[in-house]
Amino acid sequence: MPRDKVYKVIQEFDYSQDYIIPISPKEAECLSVLKKGQILTQKQFLDENKSKFKSLNLYQRLVCLTFGTGEKIGILKNIPPKSTEFEEFCKQETVAYFIRQLRGSKLKNLKETSLSSTQKNYAYALWRFSNWLQGKDFEYSQLRQVSSDSFQRQKTRVNLEGLESFYKLYIESHNSEQDFAKVIKSYLLDPRNKDKRASTVTTEQCAIKAYFEKNDSPINFRFDSKATHKVTDQEDDQPHLDLE
């Protein structure tokens, strides 16, 4: 499971202040108990404050909305986690489930923890993508219930924790494929990948798409690595086409 996001309280909530976005009474009540300098997760807040809000049905969704509002108005700041170790990454629920569905090693007498070359290549590709995602701001469309029988598509901004949290946002977003595909393409086009061969980038693209597919939530997008990355080592020595 992905680690809980860690937040630091930058300043305390002030009922008299006009904030940049509307704040519901329930969110205001939750924000009012936060103390400057406090470091906590949403789960810690939920566990520690259930008894304080006897008149308020404190539940996970409300806490999630409250912390999102707190970030937007500058009361809370997310503390990005450090890069996940590869072994820890492979133990995450959706990643382990994905790896088990790939072709295993044909060699006998290997330890249970050993990965085949295919499993290892794909797992490392996903690990690099997951570490790139950590700490990045991401805005996507999400269906939210606004009344007992009415839903509205709204923009939601979050701070990404890694691949598994990115996947869970995707399956909860209800057909916001374009927003998530754009993030994946941004990774493939990132300057850190500019010197990679097209074949290497294609492998990373295939690993990411396979991860979503093997977790029963395929994501479809087109990306031509041959148009954006080197096909041969000699490409850098070729003359560039210009108007002259």
Image (cartoon, rainbow, N blue to C red):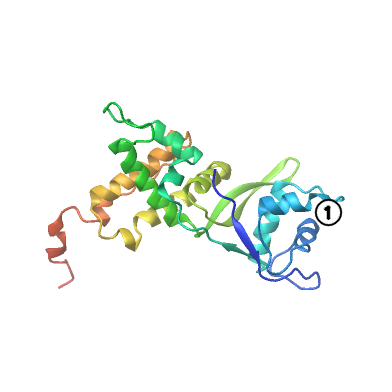
Q: Is residue 137 above or below residue 129?
A: below
- Residue 182 in sight from this viewpoint: no
Q: Is residue 91 left or right of residue 36?
A: left
Q: Is residue 167 above or below residue 237?
A: above
Tell me what residue is drawn at x 33 percent, y 63 percent: 191
Looking at the rendered structure, the kind of residue marked 1 is Lys
Quadrant of the rendered image containing residue 172: top right
- Residue 2 in sight from this viewpoint: yes
Q: Residues within 10 Å of mark 1 (few under 14, many from 20)?
A: few
Q: Quadrant of the N terminus?
A: top right
- Numbered disc total: 1
Name the residue carrying label 1.
Answer: 52
Q: Is residue 138 above or below residue 169?
A: below
Q: Quadrant of the C terminus?
A: bottom left
Judging depth in this view, the residue of 92 and 76 nearest the camera is: 92
Q: Is residue 236 left or right of residue 30?
A: left
Quadrant of the rendered image containing residue 121: top left
At which x and y percent is residue 33? 78, 62
Judging depth in this view, the residue of 72 and 119 nearest the camera is: 119
At which x and y percent is residue 219? 44, 41
At which x and y percent is residue 186? 39, 57
Tell me what residue is drawn at x 73 percent, y 49 percent: 47
Judging depth in this view, the residue of 139 and 54 nearest the camera is: 54
Helix, strand or loop status at disc 1: helix
Tell me what residue is drawn at x 15 percent, y 57 percent: 233
At which x and y percent is residue 19? 72, 70
Tell me what residue is drawn at x 31 percent, y 58 percent: 193
Q: Is residue 61 left or right of residue 181?
A: right
Judging depth in this view, the residue of 218 and 109 nearest the camera is: 109
